[in-house]
Amino acid sequence: MLEFGKAAPAAPAADLVIDGSEATFMDDVIEASKEVPVIVDFWAPWCGPCKTLGPALEAAVTKAGGKVRMVKINVDENQQISAQMRIQSIPAVYAFFDGKPVDGFTGNQTPAKITEFVGKLAALAGDGGLSEALEIAEQMLTDGEATDAAQTFAAILDEDPSIAAAYGGLVRAHLALGETAQASELLTAAPAAMANSVEIAAAKAQLELALATADAGPVAELQQAVEADPANFQARFDLAVALLAADDAEGAVAQLLELFRRDREWNDGAAKAQLFTIFDALKPQDPIVLNGRRKLSSMIFA
């Protein structure tokens, strides 16, 4: 069993709820979340449910006494960051901690759900070292130590079964070990309270990609087929899948963007759907995701 350290101090009481923008997002959200969890509320003046959810969230954040902060983003005035975060309906709420998204939901929520949501985030600010253990487990996974990572994620869940980041990490560790059946079973059994979290969505996306790339064709042959006939959309899509299987996500995104540019409706919009799956599977601030979302948005709104 892991031994966890002392709780982190709460954030200062001042400026707990602020208005943010694309220009200040890195400072207000990403950097600030390295101190305490930050809730990002995507809203608009014309959104009826936002007028109820926003004040309720503000009240809960204030009540948390500095252990959580909140940033309000007007989607009408900040369309680029909204597109990058794949905001498709509002109200939409994301929670960041240690520079990464850890939870979220869309639509209005009951007062009890809001209290529970903010309470879980506040606990991260004083979690007895669990957030540090999460960082260690993630680093293990990055370093290829999937077995150790799985054991660490499991130990964290023993301490607190409600941590979606640990649950999603455990799924990803099984995927790294090639254990897709176990990963699928874990996702099926995920608690309802975390089913819509960002971490579970990322794990689901990675499972989808693992299944899709299981029978990927040879990159060289598919590359030749695309070069011989650039309008062979199936070959281009298969090439993207093969590149994913070869751990070339950037190359896969480039092929899918080109396919979308040539025919966005091909195979019921398969290129766009696969791009979103890749974006969900990678970290939100990954340059591949940021550049891919930007290019896709420019094509959509051109």
Image: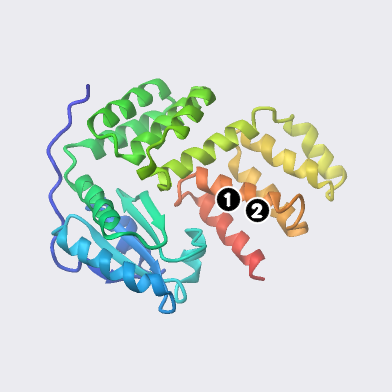
Residue at the (37%, 25%) spot, across then down: 150
Quarter where residue 162 is shown? top left
Residue at the (45%, 46%) spot, across then down: 283
| Label 2–label 1 contact, CB within 8 A | yes
Please tell me whether residue 176 is drawn above or below residue 250 in the rendered image: above
Residue at the (45%, 71%) spot, across then down: 75
Residues 199 and 254: in front is 199
Which amino acid type is shown beneath numbered disc 1? Answer: Phe
Q: Is residue 281 left or right of residue 140?
A: right
Residue 276 tag number: 1
Residues 252 and 106: in front is 106
Inter-mark Cα distance, 2 to 1? 6 Å
Quarter where residue 153 is shown? top left
Q: Is residue 113 left or right of residue 275?
A: left
Render colour scheme: rainbow
Where does label 2 land, which residue? 272
Q: Position of residue 256 (x, y in %)?
A: 68, 49
Which amino acid type is shown beneath numbered disc 2? Answer: Lys
Classify mark 2: helix, strand or loop: helix
Please tell me whether residue 102 is drawn above or below residue 186 in the rendered image: below
Q: Residues within 10 Å of mark 2 (few under 14, many from 20)?
A: some
Q: Quadrant of the C terminus?
A: bottom right
